[in-house]
Image: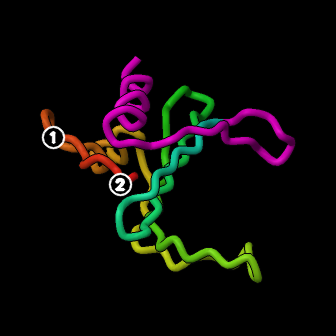
Amino acid sequence: MFEDDLVRQLLHEARFAALPLLDGDGVFSGLHLHRVTPGGVVDIVQVWADERELYHAAHARVQNTFSSDAPFAPPAALVRISGRLGDIAGALLLPPGQRLPEPPE
């Protein structure tokens, strides 16, 4: 399946981590992907399917400036888009043969 390949590429090539995305009742409804990039920027992608099995995604890029004093205060979004999974993933994947630099240890 095309969508499975896109998620695999985001995980392995673009260094995203995956968690289950739950609805308000705690039922699995999609995937939550995230990565922290150099410079303290967080990429968040959420993926879900509609009743016709079409895969949609939302992507936000935010500064990693969360505060424990106000944990639900939204961070300023640097990028915020939504659309088809293929379009969102395509914008986040590097061209073939290129890889992200290794993270510092």
- Determine crowd level at label 2: few under 14, some 14-19, many 20+ residues with C-alpha closer than 10 A: few
Residue 81, given in percent of the width and then of the height, sits at 42, 61
In the displayed structure, would residue 71 be above or below residue 58? Answer: below
Residue 48, given in percent of the width and then of the height, sits at 58, 38
Q: Secondary structure at mark 1?
A: loop
Q: Which residue, as the protein is rendered here, is positioned at the far right?
A: 25
User: Foreground residue, 18 or 57?
Assistant: 18
Q: Which residues are magenta?
A: 1-29
User: Foreground residue, 53 or 66?
Assistant: 66
Relative horizontal placement of residue 96, taking residue 43 as reference (left or right): left
Residue 40, given in percent of the width and then of the height, sits at 43, 69
Residue drawn at point x = 55 percent, y = 47 percent: 46
Of the residues under marks 2 and 1, which one precedes in the sequence?
1
Residue drawn at point x = 49 percent, y = 31 percent: 54
Q: Is residue 19 magenta?
A: yes
User: Label 2, label 1: how many angstroms apart (C-alpha)?
Assistant: 18 Å
Residue drawn at point x = 44 percent, y = 23 percent: 4
Which marked residue is nearer to the observer: mark 2 or mark 1?
2
User: Marks 1 and 2: in contact by CB < 8 Å?
Assistant: no
Viewport quadrant of the N terminus? top left
Residue 25, given in percent of the width and then of the height, sits at 86, 42
Q: Is residue 21 magenta?
A: yes
Model colouring? rainbow
Badge 1 is on which residue?
A: 98
Q: Secondary structure at mark 2?
A: loop
Numbered tag placed on residue 104 in the rendering? 2
User: Foreground residue, 43 or 99?
Assistant: 99
Q: Which residue, as the protein is rendered here, is positioned at the far bottom?
A: 69
